[in-house]
Amino acid sequence: MTKLLDTIDPVPPENIYRVDTSRRKLIPLYSSTVKAGFASPAENYIEARLNLQDLCVAHPDMTHFVKASGDSMTGDYIFPGSILVVDSTLEPVTGRIIVVSIDGNWCVKRYVEEEKRVKLESSNSAYAPIYLTKQERLEVLGVVTYIISKPPKYVRPR
């Protein structure tokens, strides 16, 4: 039998931060898009200035930044060091990614409500799902609304 702690890939409590609304910086937002396919001439016109907090944080007093660790959610592009924007005003519903405490350990999982139980899924098949009865009380920090991470490092083919 697998120990529960081996399936949750915990997030240390020191990796959970409150949103600091005191420091804000506006970053240029260009009106033209960049193509992921064939290149096209880009217009260097600044449409507006954008504050990432305005984009990512709908409820500043009820939003946390959580630094991810482990590899249980790599299929959802959550890598070690990714910053998760977590909104505590949103309810967990099937399909949403949540930050939840299981046996006192914070972790990030996909929430799936089934007929008689709740399933917390990893997106890495190396981790088994966690099943809980609907009577078991989940301590949910909130729903992940944005994932902020660096692009993957280039590995030169051999």
Image (tube, rainbow, N blue to C red):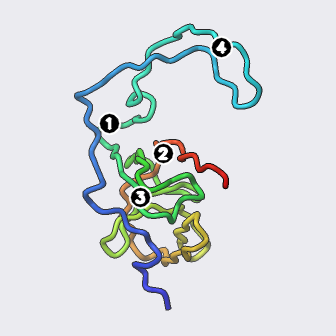
Q: CA distance from mark 4 to mark 1?
A: 34 Å
Image mark for residue 147:
2
Is residue 126 depicted above or below 107 in this figure? below
The residue beneath circle 3 is: 99
- Asked which secondary structure carries label 2, the reply is strand
For disc 1, the neighbor class at 10 Å (few under 14, some 14 to 19, many from 20) is some
Residue at x-position 66% and y-position 52%: 157
The residue that disc 4 covers is 42
Between the residue at mark 1 and the residue at mark 2, the CA separation in whole angstroms equals: 16 Å
Q: Can you tell which of label 3 and label 2 is closer to the viewer? A: 2
Q: Give the residue drawn at x 51%, y 65%.
A: 72
Q: Which sits earlier in the primary sequence, circle 4 or circle 1?
A: 4
The residue type indicated by label 1 comes to Pro
Pick the front one: 18 or 45: 45
Q: Secondary structure at mark 3?
A: strand
Q: Amino acid at mark 4?
A: Ala
Is 38 displayed left or right of 78 in the figure?
A: right
Percent position (x, y) of residue 16? 30, 53
Residue 89 locus on image (x, y percent)? 39, 46
Q: Give the Cα distance between marks 3 and 1.
A: 17 Å
**Badge number at residue 60:** 1
Question: What is the quadrant of residue 129 in the picture?
Answer: bottom right
Tell me the crowding category of disc 4: few under 14, some 14 to 19, or many 20 or more residues within 10 angstroms, Cα based.
few
| First in sequence: mark 3 vs mark 4 | 4
As measured in the structure, the alpha-carbon distance from the residue carrying label 3 to the one carrying label 4 is 39 Å
